[in-house]
Image (cartoon, rainbow, N blue to C red):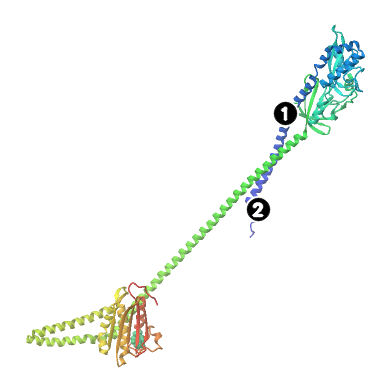
């Protein structure tokens, strides 16, 4: 027979593994979903933040320029500068230079200068520096031509002298008649903004109407252009020498596509960015704000890791709960199994006890039956013993009855004579004697009838001395015929027993004593009955030859006799032994040391005393 293969793992553990695997798979799905969600959220965050920054920085640019917008107009209204344009004396120029220098310091502008109608710079705040504008002609600059034509001009460009980029604001200076005397110009330095952005770690650049990055937080991006530089573009860029000596380069930009709401993903150089742009109000510029894509990925990754960890913790917790529940169930199952086993054991035990009890009951019933049978047999035996005793006593009994009968006859004869004589007194005495004799005969026959009765053992309270008296009465004739002296000392001794059976015991013992004393010259029977410490002790001693010590141990055996055939059956003592034992007593024989003779001692419990079995 092929034994069924046992699975490698128990079913509950296999299910746990299954759940754990499903949990892990679901965890992967959760992480994918979490990454996607976190990435979208991070993009949205970046876009919101970028939009805010764009608004802030374009406003900053606007403010940085607008704070100086009034200044050229004020300079243009100053009579000092009108005068220097009108006279151009060295003193006036010197005065104007100093004045411009002071105002420049106070206004914290990059440069202030005054230009003649031909574009030559007459006086400048940087008159004292090696790169002084004084004497330089910037008449071709759009801010100057615009100021001359329109009264005001503005322009972003790289300084031709200083090579520093700046925002130029110009206002026309006119005399009272409205003649164009020249222009007052403020150069505003925007490099500070770039510096601030760089310090804040921002990626910002500003492109002008040509698409050239004129301001950028990253120096490498400055003066780069998003478009490809072809001839037309190059020509456009050369106009007004806007960018001075700066070489315009192509931006290394790869557009990776739109991300919605004006945001795009692009590669700039080696890095990926989320790019947003917005026009700078009042200028034909665009400000660009870039968020490093790595910050977005980092955020998404961190969120994914958190979601993954959270999921793992949740799954582990659920597995723990499951294991715990399984443990509790297993313990309950084990307990139930133990209880079932105990129940089974108890049922088995009860069944075994029932079977044993039934067997015992049957055994007891069998024993009781045997005992009943035994008892009946014993009763039969006792009756037989009695009959045997009666048989042996019959001659003596006949003599016993014959004696009063003979006496009766004698009395009858004398009665007749007394009647004939009319001797009333003698008659009356005779009748009295005859009545006594008849009563004695009646008493003897009554006793014999009772003794011979076959009766089962009957326990009742009896007086042992009464049983002795009855035995002596039955054997009275034999005792007297044998010439035996009887010595009686009887105390009343109430006990629970059967009077007839006890009488039979005493008849046996006294008869044995009479038999034993047949050859003795002096015949004496001493019967003592006394109560001793809860026991009734009867001692029947004779003056016979005593008992041969060789047969002492066999006396109470059934059918043991030393008497000749016809005289003894050997049943008397064995039956007596059985009767006394049934009443909870003992019987034994001993030889009397002085004067020989045998003594039989019977001990029976007094009424109300516990029996002593032998
Ligand atoms: P049986 O009297 O028929 O022999 P018992 O059982 O009464 O049977 O007695 C057994 C024997 O015990 C007697 O044969 C006798 O040898 C002995 N025996 C009994 N009583 C006495 C006694 N008082 N003295 C001496 N021997 C006795």
Q: Is residue 395 visible?
A: no
Which residue is depicted at the point 19% across and 81% down?
Answer: 439
Question: Which mark is on residue 9?
Answer: 2
Q: Quadrant of residue 193?
A: top right
Q: Quadrant of residue 521?
A: bottom left
Which residue is depicted at the point 44% across and 68% down?
Answer: 360
In this rendering, the count of numbered labels is 2
Mark 1 C-beta to ligand 1 under 8 Å? no
Label 2 element class:
loop
Q: Relative to 428, is 465 on the left or the right?
A: right
Label 1 element class:
helix
Q: CA distance from mark 1 to mark 2?
A: 55 Å
Q: Position of residue 346 (x, y in %)?
A: 50, 60
Quarter of the picture containing the C terminus is bottom left
User: Where does ligand 1 appear, by image quarter?
Assistant: bottom left
Q: Position of residue 18 (x, y in %)?
A: 66, 47
Residue toward you, 193 or 292: 193
**Badge nearest the viewer, 1 or 2:** 1
Question: Which mark is on residue 529?
Answer: none
Quarter of the picture containing the N terminus is bottom right
Q: Position of residue 463 (x, y in %)?
A: 29, 76
Residue at image mark 1: 48
Residue toward you, 579 or 45: 45
């Amino acid at each position: 027979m092929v034994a069924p293969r046992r699975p490698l793992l128990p079913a509950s553990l296999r299910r746990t593994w299954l759940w754990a695997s499903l949990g892990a798979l679901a965890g992967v799905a959760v992480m994918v979903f979490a990454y996607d969600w976190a990435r979208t959220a991070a993009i949205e965050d970046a876009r919101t933040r970028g939009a805010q920054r764009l608004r802030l920085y374009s406003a900053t640019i606007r403010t940085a320029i607008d704070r100086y917008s009034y200044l050229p107009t004020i300079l243009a209204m100053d009579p000092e500068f009108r005068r220097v344009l009108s006279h151009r004396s060295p003193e006036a120029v010197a005065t104007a230079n100093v004045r411009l220098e002071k105002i420049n310091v106070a206004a914290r502008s990059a440069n202030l200068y005054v230009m003649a109608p031909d574009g030559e710079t007459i006086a400048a705040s940087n008159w004292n520096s090696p790169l002084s504008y004084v004497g330089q002609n910037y008449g071709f600059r759009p801010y100057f031509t615009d100021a001359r034509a329109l009264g005001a001009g503005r322009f972003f460009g790289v300084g031709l002298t200083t090579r520093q980029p700046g925002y130029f604001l110009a206002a026309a200076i006119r005399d009272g008649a409205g003649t164009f005397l020249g222009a007052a110009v403020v150069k505003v330095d925007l490099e500070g903004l770039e510096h601030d952005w760089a310090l804040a770690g921002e990626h910002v650049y500003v492109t002008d109407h040509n698409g050239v990055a004129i301001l950028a937080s990253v120096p490498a991006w400055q003066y780069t252009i998003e478009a490809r530089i072809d001839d037309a573009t190059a020509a456009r860029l050369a106009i007004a020498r806007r960018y001075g000596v700066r070489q315009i380069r192509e931006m290394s930009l790869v557009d990776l596509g739109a991300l919605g709401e004006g945001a795009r993903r692009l590669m700039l150089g080696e890095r990926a960015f989320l790019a947003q742009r917005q026009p700078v109000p009042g200028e034909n510029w665009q400000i660009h704000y870039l968020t490093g894509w790595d910050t977005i990925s980092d955020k998404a990754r961190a969120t994914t890791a958190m979601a993954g960890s959270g999921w793992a913790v949740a799954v582990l917790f659920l597995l723990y709960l499951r294991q715990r529940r399984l443990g509790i169930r297993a313990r309950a199952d084990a307990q139930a199994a133990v209880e079932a086993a105990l129940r089974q054991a108890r049922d088995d035990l009860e069944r075994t006890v029932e079977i044993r009890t039934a067997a015992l009951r049957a055994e007891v019933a069998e024993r009781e039956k045997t005992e009943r049978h035994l008892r009946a047999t014993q009763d039969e035996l006792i009756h037989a013993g009695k009959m045997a005793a009666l048989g042996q006593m019959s001659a003596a009994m006949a003599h016993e009855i014959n004696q009063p009968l003979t006496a009766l006859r004698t009395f009858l004869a004398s009665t007749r004579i007394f009647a004939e004589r009319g001797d009333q007194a003698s008659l009356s005495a005779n009748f009295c004697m005859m009545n006594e004799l008849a009563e004695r005969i009646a008493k003897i026959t009554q006793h014999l009838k009772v003794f011979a009765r076959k009766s089962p053992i009957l326990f009742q309270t009896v007086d042992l001395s009464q049983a002795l008296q009855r035995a002596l009465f039955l054997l009275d004739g034999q005792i007297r015929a044998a010439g035996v002296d009887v010595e009686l000392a009887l105390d009343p001794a109430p006990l629970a027993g059967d009077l007839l059976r006890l009488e039979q015991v005493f008849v046996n013992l006294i008869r044995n004593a009479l038999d034993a004393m047949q050859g003795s010259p002096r015949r004496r029977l001493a019967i003592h009955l006394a109560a001793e410490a809860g026991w009734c002790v009867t001692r029947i001693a004779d003056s016979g030859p005593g008992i041969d010590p060789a047969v002492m141990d066999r006396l109470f055996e059934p059918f043991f006799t030393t008497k000749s055939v016809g005289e003894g059956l050997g049943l008397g003592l064995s039956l007596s032994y059985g009767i006394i034992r049934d009443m909870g007593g003992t019987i034994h024989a001993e030889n009397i040391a002085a004067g020989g003779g045998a003594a039989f001692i019977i001990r029976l419990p007094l009424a109300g005393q516990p029996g002593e079995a032998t």
